Amino acid sequence: MTLYIKYMVSLRCKMIVKEELEKLGLRYSMIDLGTVELVDTISQEQRDMLHLNLLRSGLELLDDKKAILIEKIKGVIVEMIHYSEELPKVNYSTYISEKLHYDYTYLSNIFSEVKGITIQQYIIIHKIEKVKELLLYDELNLTEISYRLHYSSVAHLSNQFKKVTGLSPSFYKQLKQKRTRNLEDL
């Protein structure tokens, strides 16, 4: 039996879900971002308890089919951008469609209807978050980051970064470095 959990986007979230399942004596075969595969069926009482316990941790057990599909889309995007060594070579639309076994137009329409933004805008937001993370690690320069995240050029990455954050990538990096130095001086 598969359960879908909203806001489950990190290893910490996976640990919380694991603890809650164990508290309720629920056996699982797999815990992944946004999904849990249970070995046995879950009673309504167990489901209600799990729902309440997850809410206390900022997570939410999903029942609605649209909400479940939205979480699957978000999960594919988060995994693709934040947890893959390399982004897919195919169009994101093709990748998402193949991963979820749905027509991309259908996925796109539902996502926009429910979230109020397009899948492409959601991808851009996460790509910029990844750029911020890579800038702070200071292991890659902008050219390497733009190549890694499949931007056509450093200028394209910089323009998109500025649209989303209001700052240039270099200014963002300077601000973060200055803030870190100030904290170290305390």
Image (cartoon, grey):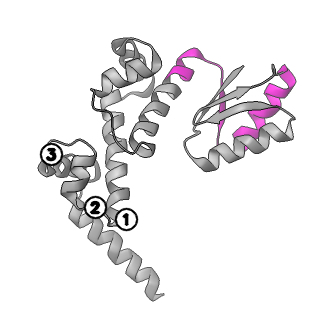
- Mark 3 or 2 closer to N-term? 2
- Extreme bottom residue here? 185
Q: Nearer the viewer, residue 133 or 143?
A: 143
Q: Are marks 3 and 2 in contact (CB under 8 Å)?
A: no
Q: Where 98 falls versus 85 (above or below)? A: above
Numbered tag placed on residue 156 in the rendering: 3
- Looking at the image, residue 112 sits to the left or right of residue 56; the answer is left
Principal SS element in the magenta part? Answer: helix
Residue 57 seen from this side: no
Image quadrant of residue 67?
top right
**How many residues crowd around disc 3 within 10 Å: few (fewer than 14), some, or many (20 or more)?**
few
**Residue 49 forms part of the magenta stretch:** yes
- Mark 1 or 3 closer to N-term? 1
Image quadrant of residue 96?
top left
Q: Nearer the viewer, residue 151 or 182?
A: 151
Q: Are marks 2 and 1 in contact (CB under 8 Å)?
A: yes
Label 2 sits on a secondary structure element that is: loop
Residue underneath mark 1: 137
Q: Where 183 falls versus 12 (above or below)? A: below
| 3D distance between C-alphas at marks 3 and 2 | 17 Å
**Residue 182 forms part of the magenta stretch:** no
| 3D distance between C-alphas at marks 2 and 1 | 8 Å
Instruction: Name the amino acid type tagged 2.
Output: Leu
- Looking at the image, residue 36 sits to the left or right of residue 116; the answer is right
Numbered tag placed on residue 140 in the rendering: 2
Q: Position of residue 88 (x, y in %)?
A: 32, 33
Instruction: Name the amino acid type tagged 1.
Output: Tyr
Find the magenta span and give its range.
Answer: 43-69
